[in-house]
Amino acid sequence: MIKKKPKSRIRVKKKLKKTIKGTAEKPRLSVYKSLDEIYIQFIDDLENKTLLAVSSISKDVKSKVADIKNKVEKSKAVGKAAAEVAISKGISTGIFDRGGFRYHGRIRALADGLREGGLKI
């Protein structure tokens, strides 16, 4: 079962990517989570460029989330920080791409943090 789980996530991710396309005005917000960290990229699919990348280990965010032990709260803080950085770069909206992960727990907390930070997804 352990080998089947990543394969099914990748299959769902490919299926989602066919329907979700980001632009410079409304980029795709691609999410990846590892066991301890969470990553988010703002991607323009028309130009195939990453406009912005924020994670729980990036320099600006690491100091904000260093004392948070709960992974869900950490994800929410990363979402708020990513929204602040995106708004300062001129990005106000986006299309949320959960990357094949279920929309609960850390993924949902990240999306809530993005919304609380002022980003429209």
Image (tube, rainbow, N blue to C red):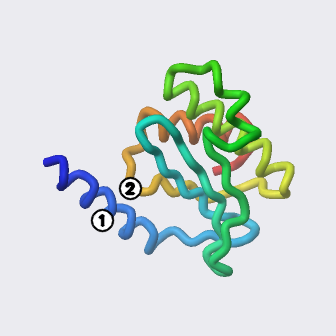
The tag on residue 87 is none
Q: Where is residue 13 in the image (x, y as percent from the top left)?
A: 38, 63
Residue at the spot of label 1:
11
Query: As shown in the figure, which amino acid type bears the numbered disc 1?
Result: Arg
Q: Position of residue 68 (x, y in %)?
A: 59, 20
Above/below status of 19 relative to 37:
below
Q: Residue at x 25, y 58 (%)?
A: 8
Dot 1 surroundings within 10 Å: few (below 14), some, or many (20 or more)? few
Q: How many marks?
A: 2
Q: Residue at x 64, y 25 (%)?
A: 66
Q: Position of residue 79 (x, y in %)?
A: 64, 39
Dot 2 surroundings within 10 Å: few (below 14), some, or many (20 or more)? some
Q: Position of residue 24 (x, y in %)?
A: 74, 70
| CB-based contact (under 8 Å), mark 1 and mark 2 | yes
Query: As shown in the figure, which amino acid type bears the numbered disc 2?
Result: Gly
Q: Residue at x 39, y 49 (%)?
A: 101
Sequence order check: which comes first, mark 1 or mark 2? 1
Above/below status of 92 relative to 72:
below
SS at circle 2 = loop
Looking at the picture, tell me which residue is in the foreground, 106 or 119. Answer: 106
Q: Which residue is drawn at 65% across and 27% down?
A: 65
> Residue 27 occupies which quadrant of the picture?
bottom right
SS at circle 1 = helix
Of all residues, the one furthest to the left in this rendering is 1
The alpha-carbon separation of the residues under discs 1 and 2 comes to 8 Å
Residue at the spot of label 2:
100
